[in-house]
């Protein structure tokens, strides 16, 4: 039963504290669009997406008006395109162009799923798809790509890791006239989830229904605002405040997801209760950590504070929704978080500290701008390090690194919108990991994979 206090509190969250639904994402299976002829396959893909998602954007807008809460993005995720490429042969970029055309027709912000799952090795279509990623991202605006190169069960496919270093580097080169934007739409995963509504890593897993609606919530500003009312409480009290706030945020996501499901006539999948920051002042995960008592994000204690935040968000959110999934926790994308941008600019936030933070947060090394001289082997080594954290800890980790072609440490890239901007961060580019990466093969799965 809602009372006037609950209603007023929600209004304040929306108007003053940046509460929003970050995305409603429609997952669409394209398995029935496979065809030996790539042109026929692309026609089926376009028809199915535009038919299922014809009213996705308008439904989101109607729900915004009904409940008065902003829904920032309307997105689509599809079956990993490498699976269709295996059946059709031909140039996988034709699928990217088809997805782009479909995105423009239905009016969504992004389509995710130009993807391949190669954690145990390459099957038909995988390598062709991966090698086409730089071109696909260069010739489209709305397509996002992901590759899963490892898992706790399978270990890490180091041949795929080596290949992805080259792909990331080439994607940066092909879009250097646009601040290397291609890399901002490409993520490399370990333990990728099948039901993630957030870009750039969203794809529609083979275990998902034919069509489904997922919701991704936000609300770092709301959590920070709640903590300002407890300046002297101990950390147990801080955790309780975050849990209660996460519950309220997630209930809004559950409400929006249920309504969208009913209106669109498709099943409701999950609420991803991740705290997703933006470059807007007051909507920062880093600022939450600083509200706990850190002078600046990146100083000693940052990893512990982030662990508390991530755990409390999950505990509070899981009670608020019947189906929680995706990534769920706290995101730390550097260029998308106002507080992290400031900490990176001042040098207080290093890639080493970010790597430690990824062991306890929702994803991984996200939106890291690196010097233009960064080699493919160094990018691969960063991917391998982050995948190892995910593999050993049985959690999802990811890397979205952007080599800033032609730029050096201290200079900046700017993407605009939710992708934000950020400084080029220093790496160990004077020390090589090339021999390690060129060994190839697989890093075996850890002992904790043997749970059966």
Image: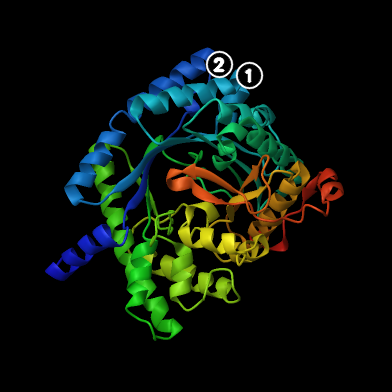
Q: Name the residue under label 1.
A: 89
Work out whether residue 47 or residue 386 is closer to the camera in this orientation and state it.
386
State the residue at coordinates (34%, 57%).
322
Q: For residue 246, say whether it is visible.
A: no
Work out whether residue 132 or residue 193 is closer to the camera in this orientation and state it.
132
Secondary structure beneath disc 2? helix
Residue 213: x and y in percent read 35, 42
Residue 128: x and y in percent read 67, 27
Looking at the image, is mark 2 or mark 1 earlier in the sequence? Answer: 2
Residue 38: image quadrant is top right
Total of numbered circles in the picture?
A: 2
Q: In this view, does 261 lie to the left or right of 177?
A: left
Q: In this view, does 164 lie to the left or right of 247?
A: right
Q: Is residue 330 left or right of residue 131?
A: left
State the residue at coordinates (83%, 51%).
432
Crowding around mark 1 (Cα neighbors within 10 Å: few <14, some 14 to 19, many 20+) is some
Q: For residue 406, say whether it is visible.
A: yes
Give the quarter of the figure containing the C terminus.
Answer: bottom right
Q: Tell me the CA gap for discs 2 and 1.
A: 7 Å
Extreme left residue here? 4
Secondary structure beneath disc 1? loop
Residue 222: image quadrant is bottom left
Q: What scheme was used to colour the molecule?
A: rainbow
Q: Mark 2 points at which residue?
A: 38
Work out whether residue 121 or residue 94 is closer to the camera in this orientation and state it.
94
Pointer 2 with pointer 1, Cβ within 8 A: yes
Q: In this view, does 442 lie above or below 306?
A: above
Q: Is residue 205 above or below residue 230?
A: above
């Amino acid at each position: 039963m809602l009372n006037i206090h609950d209603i007023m509190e929600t209004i304040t969250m929306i108007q003053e504290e940046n509460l929003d639904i970050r995305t409603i994402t429609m997952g669409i299976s394209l398995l029935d669009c496979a065809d030996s002829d790539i042109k026929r396959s692309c026609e089926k893909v376009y028809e199915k997406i535009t038919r299922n998602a014809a009213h996705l954007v308008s439904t989101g807008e109607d729900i915004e008006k009904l409940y008065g809460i902003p829904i920032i993005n309307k997105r689509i995720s599809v079956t990993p395109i490498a699976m269709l490429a295996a059946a059709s042969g031909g140039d996988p970029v034709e699928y990217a162009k088809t997805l782009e055309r479909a995105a423009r027709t239905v009016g969504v912000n992004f389509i995710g799923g130009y993807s391949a799952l190669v954690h145990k090795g390459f099957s038909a279509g995988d390598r062709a798809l991966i090698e086409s990623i730089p071109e696909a991202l260069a010739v489209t605006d709305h397509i996002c790509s992901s590759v899963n190169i490892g898992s706790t069960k399978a270990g890490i496919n180091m041949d795929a890791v080596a290949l992805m270093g080259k792909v990331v580097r080439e994607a940066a080169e092909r879009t250097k006239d646009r601040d290397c934007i291609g890399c901002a739409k490409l993520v490399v995963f370990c333990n990728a989830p099948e039901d993630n509504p957030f870009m750039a890593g969203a794809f529609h897993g083979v275990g998902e229904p034919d069509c489904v609606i997922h919701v991704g919530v936000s609300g770092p500003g709301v959590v920070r605002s709640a903590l300002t009312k407890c300046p002297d409480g101990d950390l147990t009290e801080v955790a309780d405040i975050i849990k209660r706030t996460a519950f309220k945020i997630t209930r809004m996501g559950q409400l929006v997801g249920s309504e969208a499901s009913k209106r669109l006539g498709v099943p409701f999948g999950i609420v991803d209760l991740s705290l997703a920051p933006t470059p807007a002042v007051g909507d920062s995960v880093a600022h939450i950590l600083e509200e706990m008592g850190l002078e600046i994000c990146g100083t000693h204690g940052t990893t512990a504070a982030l662990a508390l935040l991530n755990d409390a968000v999950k505990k509070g959110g899981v009670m608020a929704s019947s189906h929680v999934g995706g990534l769920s926790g706290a995101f730390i994308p550097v260029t998308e978080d106002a507080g992290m941008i400031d900490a990176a600019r001042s040098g207080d936030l290093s890639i080493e500290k970010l790597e430690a933070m990824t062991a306890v947060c929702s994803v991984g090394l996200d939106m890291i701008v690196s010097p233009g001289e960064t080699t493919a082997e160094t990018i691969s080594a960063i991917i391998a390090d982050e995948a190892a954290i995910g593999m050993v800890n049985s959690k999802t980790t990811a890397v979205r690194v952007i080599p800033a072609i032609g730029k050096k440490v201290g200079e900046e890239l700017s993407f605009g919108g939710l992708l934000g901007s950020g400084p080029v961060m220093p790496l160990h580019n004077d020390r090589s990991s090339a021999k390690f990466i060129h060994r190839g093969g697989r890093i075996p799965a850890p002992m904790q994979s043997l749970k059966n």
